[in-house]
Amino acid sequence: MSNNTAISCNLVNNSSSASGNCPLVGKMITIKKRKNKSFVPLGVPKFNGSIEEEGLVFDMKIEKTLTPVDKINIEILNKQNGTIIFQEEITDRNKLSEGDHEWTWDGFDTNDVLDTKLLRSLEIEIKATAFMGTQSSFHSEEFKIKRELKHKWVDIKINKSNNTIDVTLKINFKDGGTNGLNRRVPASVITNNGNIAPIRTRTETFSTLKSWAISGINQYWSRNVVINGITYSVSINAIQSSANSMKTPKIIYCTNQTGGRSRNWEASRILFYNIGYLKYKGQWYLANKNKTDKHYRHTSAHEVGHEILKAYGGHLYSKRHKETSTLVTQSPLPNTPYPLRGEIDLMKYSSDRYYPNRFYTHSKAAEKDVNGLIWLTKIKIK
Ligand SMILES: [Zn+2]
């Protein structure tokens, strides 16, 4: 006798079967991953606008069965502890017919959360179970989630139930020490400024400057974005980390000389905190502490932003400040005024000689660049 489908239920007790169904001996269903396939959470497009896959596609095959398939249950399981990450019941008859079908998982779990860091830590199993009357048959396969891109410094957690996206950015500020503490400031300059003494010991520690730099990144890169017609609130959480962090400037405390010009590219990475007596085009002035602290946070967000722009849009997009500056001398291009209303792009230069009053309140990383952070978390199946 070799009629598999006629086998009595109580002969087969080595297979898990839900709600008392009788497992079949023959495989009535198979589900297979497509190797090295990748997708971007929420299908955020590439920098050039090209479409990205929004999920992992699996190939499902339903064999010819004597009894029609009533439903298929697909489970994405955490292999280590057996818990269900996601599951879907298919009852649409068109999707239960004999032959080849596709099934797509967008990476979200049963709570509508997609967490790139968590997914990479799991051994995952996909299991498809076909139910035919009182009988069932299943097939499963294991896989792992990896990064598609080399940028290990960004991870995201998307929560579709409250439309929030938490972005973790690993940065690694280093202590660049001080410049100018022992430099002389002309006596006349000190007299003209109410005899305020030049700074001789640093007034802010590296640790303080680091925390202000981090708060600047979080402030200027957090914003609302619209993806597929849905508004998400994106919160940036920059964390200091020596492992897997992006290239990050050293921080130098600078006073009693020409203020340092911050930069962050392959040849040099310095974030300056310019305070106290400073020279600009040969003229001495005393920095306004409140403005200095505000500007420093803005500059931190801008400089760190160069690495994000480079990773997402390439060298020229980053170094030419999104078509608002020259490449070599890093000067603003003519006719690039600050906008009179709306957002001021954190990463753009301007030909205007003065910052507008609303500079710090309206500066933001552009929506496209923040979406770029999501794109950078592109996922691959292994
Ligand atoms: Zn710049």
Image: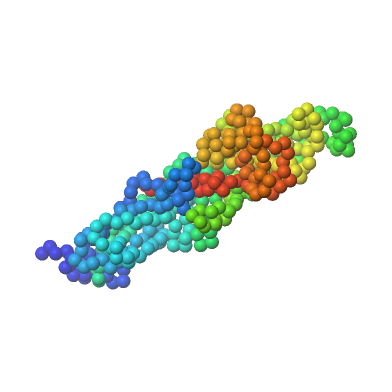
For residue 318, which quarter of the picture? top right
**Who's the residue at 33% across and 59% down the image?**
127
Q: Is residue 280 left or right of residue 229?
A: right
Q: Is residue 297 left or right of residue 374?
A: right
**Which residue is pictured at 49% across the width and 55% down the height?**
228
The quadrant in which the N terminus is found is bottom left
The answer to whether 89 is drawn above or below residue 106 in the figure is: below
* Image coords of residue 260 (percent x, y): 70, 32
The location of residue 149, given as percent across then percent down, is 45, 42
Pick the front one: 252 or 294: 294
Most foreground residue, 345 or 8: 345
Residue at position x 55%, y 41% in the image: 308
Report whether residue 185 is seen: yes
Residue 123 seen in the current view: no
Residue 190, placed above or below residue 132: above
Residue 151 position, x and y percent, is 49, 41
The number of numbered discs placed on residues in the rendered structure image is: 0
The front one of 34 and 331 is 331
The residue positioned 56% from the left and 31% from the top of the image is 266
